[in-house]
């Protein structure tokens, strides 16, 4: 796992990521640059590997892209995993993401229902003929001069669904280079008083795409849950800079 400045920490304490734990369920606020599942044998840490060290029977109930931060559900036993899998399959898990997108966009529960085709190797495309059903609602939360903070509510759970659906609206997520999103540099929004030292290279305010799994609601057995994850440091920093210089 890499920290926000690109370094790899010597230790990552799984317990520090937990925002809820009971006899059946663990919920974490996944940091960016940490894969949900093992990417290769002997590779960098993953949520699954860390979770199994913490609780041997842990199973990841769904996935987040490596760069995406936010809420991730982990079952502590096979029965809880089965019940949560049924909730996802029946689309009874309410998921809310927050994203910072390029441009000023007024989305008032906009439904994007463009089918998505998985091409393999983590590539997807919109394909009306052969794609699988994909539905996402978007609602604008905060407007800046050149950017918008949006709430994203995916109904289905296709790979890259939020990212590709936003791109179809000419509203790529900041930093999402795969879908033509561009990073934000302080020099772009702070027109006056910005200087770099000789030989220094300006780095983007946020070194990933700006997508965060903010809220989850579901029922497991007869227990109803609602979780909310605070923004990680990089997402919060970008918002602060936009509020200060792009408002």
Image (spheres, rainbow, N blue to C red):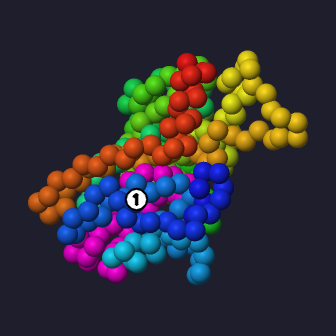
Assign the C terminus to one quadrant of the image.
top right
Q: Where is residue 141 drawn, in percent x and y?
A: 42, 28
In the figure, 128 relative to 143: above or below? below
Q: Is residue 31 left or right of residue 205?
A: left
Residue nearest the viewer, comparing 116 with 36: 36
Residue nearest the viewer, comparing 138 with 190: 190
Badge 1 element: helix
Q: Which residues are magenta?
A: 56-81
Q: Quadrant of residue 101?
A: top right
What residue lies at 83% left-to-right and 40% top-to-bottom?
200
Q: Quadrant of residue 201?
A: top right
Q: Is residue 46 left or right of residue 246?
A: left
What residue lies at 21% left-to-right and 53% top-to-bottom?
225
Q: Residue furthest right?
A: 199
Assign the N terminus to one quadrant of the image.
bottom right
Residue nearest the viewer, comparing 2 with 43: 2
Is residue 56 visible in the rendered image? The answer is yes
Q: Where is residue 196 drawn, in percent x and y?
A: 80, 32
Q: Tell how many labels.
A: 1
Residue nearest the viewer, comparing 211 with 55: 55
What residue lies at 60% left-to-right and 76% top-to-bottom?
43
Q: Where is residue 161 drawn, in percent x and y?
A: 49, 50
Is residue 136 visible in the rendered image? The answer is no
- To which residue does mark 1 refer? 17
Q: Where is residue 81 drawn, in percent x and y?
A: 28, 71
In the figure, 130 relative to 247: above or below? below
What residue lies at 35% left-to-right and 59% top-to-bottom?
18
Q: Is residue 158 left or right of residue 223?
A: right
Does the magenta-highlighted stretch encompass residue 19? no
Q: Residues within 10 Å of mark 1 (few under 14, many from 20)?
A: some
């Amino acid at each position: 796992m890499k920290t926000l400045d690109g370094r790899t920490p010597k230790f990552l304490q799984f317990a520090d990521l937990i925002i809820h734990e009971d006899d059946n369920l663990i919920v974490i606020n996944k940091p960016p640059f940490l894969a949900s599942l093992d990417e290769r044998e002997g590779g960098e840490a993953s949520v699954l590997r860390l979770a199994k060290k913490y609780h041997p029977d842990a199973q990841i109930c769904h996935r987040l892209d490596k760069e995406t931060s936010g809420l991730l559900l982990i079952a502590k036993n096979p029965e809880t995993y089965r019940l949560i899998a049924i909730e996802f399959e029946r689309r009874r898990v309410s998921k809310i993401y927050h994203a910072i997108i390029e441009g000023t966009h007024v989305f008032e529960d906009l439904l994007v229902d463009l089918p998505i085709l998985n091409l393999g190797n983590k590539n997807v495309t919109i394909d009306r003929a052969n794609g699988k059903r994909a539905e996402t609602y978007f609602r604008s939360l905060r407007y800046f001069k050149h950017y918008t903070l949006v709430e994203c509510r995916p109904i289905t759970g296709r790979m890259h669904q939020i990212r590709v659906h936003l791109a179809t609206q000419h509203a790529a997520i900041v930093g999402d280079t795969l879908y033509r999103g561009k990073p934000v540099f302080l020099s772009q929004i702070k027109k006056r008083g910005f200087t770099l030292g000789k030989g220094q290279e300006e780095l983007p305010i946020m070194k990933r795409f700006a997508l965060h799994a903010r809220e989850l609601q579901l029922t497991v057995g007869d227990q109803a849950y609602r979780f909310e994850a605070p923004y990680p440091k990089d997402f919060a920093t970008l918002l602060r800079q936009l509020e200060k210089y792009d408002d």
